């Protein structure tokens, strides 16, 4: 409401907070869903990090400007993390107290 009032009053104020262009998205699991998330994020100008247990297609890496990193680097650098992996014995408890502690505050 305050932005609406300001605009109608002839003022244009910058919205508080950070622009998405200043943020980093980390995606764990770069399969079909992860790729769709990364394409959209790159379209908004976010820095994009990715991690997958399989090799990520180099053409896709180039397409979205993906930085392929290990999980620890992804958690330490990302402002937002998107988990897009199936639940299996390898991914079960992928995120735990220790991993959350490694994330940016």
Image (cartoon, rainbow, N blue to C red):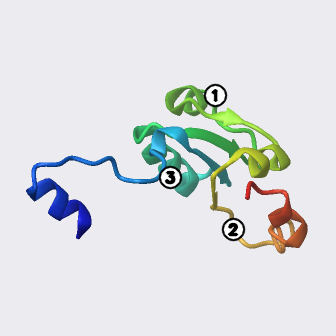
How many other residues sit within 10 Å of disc 2, few (<14), some (14-19) or many (≥20)? few
N-terminal-most mark, 3 or 1: 3
Q: Which numbered disc covers residue 58?
A: 1
Q: Nearer the viewer, mark 3 or mark 2?
A: 3
* Residue 3 quadrant: bottom left
Which sits in the foreground, 28 or 26? Answer: 26
Q: Which numbered disc covers residue 37?
A: 3
Which residue is at 10% across, 56% downward? 9
- Residue 105 in the image, given as x and y percentages of width and height: 73, 58
Q: CA distance from mark 3 to mark 1?
A: 17 Å
For residue 13, side relative to residue 77 (left or right): left
How many other residues sit within 10 Å of disc 3, few (<14), some (14-19) or many (≥20)? some
The residue at which mark 2 appears reads as: 86
Which residue is at 64% across, 28% downward? 58
Secondary structure, mark 2, is loop
Location of residue 97 with respect to 79 vertically, above or below: below
For residue 2, side relative to residue 87 (left or right): left
For residue 63, side relative to residue 12 (left or right): right
| Quarter placement of the N terminus | bottom left
Location of residue 3 with respect to 43 vertically, above or below: below
N-terminal-most mark, 3 or 2: 3
Secondary structure, mark 3, is helix
């Amino acid at each position: 409401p305050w932005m609406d009032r300001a605009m109608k009053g002839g003022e244009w104020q910058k919205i508080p907070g950070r622009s998405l262009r200043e943020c980093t998205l980390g995606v764990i699991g770069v399969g079909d869903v992860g790729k769709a998330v990364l394409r959209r994020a790159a379209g908004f100008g976010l820095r994009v990090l990715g991690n997958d247990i399989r090799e990520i297609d180099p053409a896709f890496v180039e397409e979205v400007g993906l930085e392929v990193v290990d999980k620890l680097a992804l958690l330490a650098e990302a402002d937002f993390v998107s988990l897009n992996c199936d639940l299996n014995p390898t991914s079960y408890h992928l995120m735990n107290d220790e991993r959350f502690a490694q994330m940016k505050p």
